[in-house]
Structures are given as C-alpha cells and as structure tokens.
Amino acid sequence: MYNKIRKYIEMNMSRPRFEHSLSTALICVELCSKFGLDEQKGRIAGIAHDISREIIVDDKLLKQIEDNYFISSDEKLNHVLLHGRIGAAFLRDKFNLTDNNILQAVRWHTTGHPDMGQLGQVLFSADYIEPGRKYMTSSLRDSIMELDLNEMTLRVLNDRTAYLRDNGYRIAESSIQLFDKLTKFGRIINI
C-alpha cells in the first residue's frame, strides 16, 4: 500500500510536497516506534496525509467526503482546511484503504480533532515538526519529541493556534475540541 501511494504522490504532486510527505512519513515512523504504535500505519499516514493538498476543491469532491462530520463554515470558506478530509475519502476510494486509524489520522491532520486517535496525534505532530519546515530547528524538534504523546500534541496545537491568532485567522472548532480533550485528562504545559 505504501509503495502505491508513494508512487502516486511522486507522479502527481510537486517535488516540495512529495519531499514533505516523505519526511513526514519518516517522523511518523520514529514517533510510532517511540509510542508503541504500528510503524507501517504511521508510514502510510505520513506519506498520504497531503495527497489532496494540491487539488482544486469543487462540489464533486465535497460530496465524496462522506465521513459523518458536518462541513463547517470555516471549511466552506477556506477549502485548504478540507484537504485531509478529501484525502481520506480519496485514499478510501482510489486505494481501497479501509484502516480507520489511518483514515482518521489523514482526515484530521490539518486542524486536529478529538476523534483522531493516537496515530492521528502522531501525524498531526510529525507534519508540524518534520525537518523541511522552515521554522523548525533541530533543537526545537528534539524538545518537542521528548514529550509524551498528549503533551506533544498539545504543544503542536498551542503553536499552531498561536500562529493563527497572531495572523488574524479563526481557530477551527475541532482544534478547540481537541484542546479541551487534551487538557481535561492531562495537564496544561507551559510553553
């Protein structure tokens, strides 16, 4: 499955997006190993997470989502927020991918969601800390990777929402719900 998806991405996406996906897959494998999760599932989620990032969203694509979650007003206004959900539907339809852990991880890697599961948390974090990100230094990545899974997810979520707020963007409702879930059962870390 990984090789089919990798080949599709290499042939159909820009070189920078392909390299980002490869790098994210490597970080996913590393984090899955650390947290005792299935490394192959992490590898597939990492390579596949942006599979629909470079496509133009139209009504036909929106109808294919069919994931039992409503499309928010923010997603309707900013289609880039939908690329994970569209990607999950694409993986299901084109590659017959049925593993719900991988589909949920891909579905929610952009905004986060309380239903994304541990593999989703790994992908959410790996997408943010992969070495190709211009803002990511090795020391910052190392400090984030030292955290446990919930703390890591919360740290990435805090960093992402701070960036959005500082730049005048709204925070997705699913991000707020994820924050509430993580802080309800864990501890809030000072960043």
Image: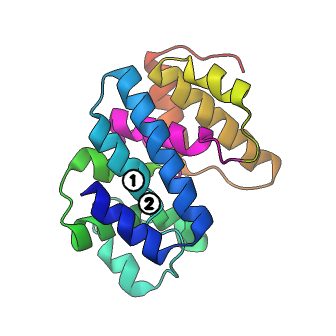
Based on the picture, tell me whether residue 147 belongs to the magenta stretch.
no
Question: Is 147 above or below relative to 85?
Answer: above
Mark 2 is surrounded, within 10 Å at the Cα level, by few (under 14), some (14 to 19) or many (20 or more) other residues, namely many
The stretch of residues the image draws in magenta is: 110-133
Q: Are marks 1 and 2 in contact (CB under 8 Å)?
A: yes
Examine the structure image and report whether residue 119 is included in the region drawn in magenta.
yes
Neighbour class for label 1 at 10 Å: few (<14), some, many (≥20)?
many
Residue 52: where, in percent of width, then height? 45, 70
Residue drawn at 30 percent across, 53 percent down: 103
Q: Quadrant of residue 113?
A: top left
Left-right relation of 98 to 74? left
Percent of width and height locating residue 153: 52, 30
| Number of the label disc, if any, that sits on residue 84 | 2
The residue wearing badge 1 is 106
Q: Name the image quarter holding residue 119.
A: top left
Q: Residue at x 59, y 17 (%)?
A: 188
Q: Amino acid at mark 1?
A: Val
Of 167 and 131, nearer the camera is 131
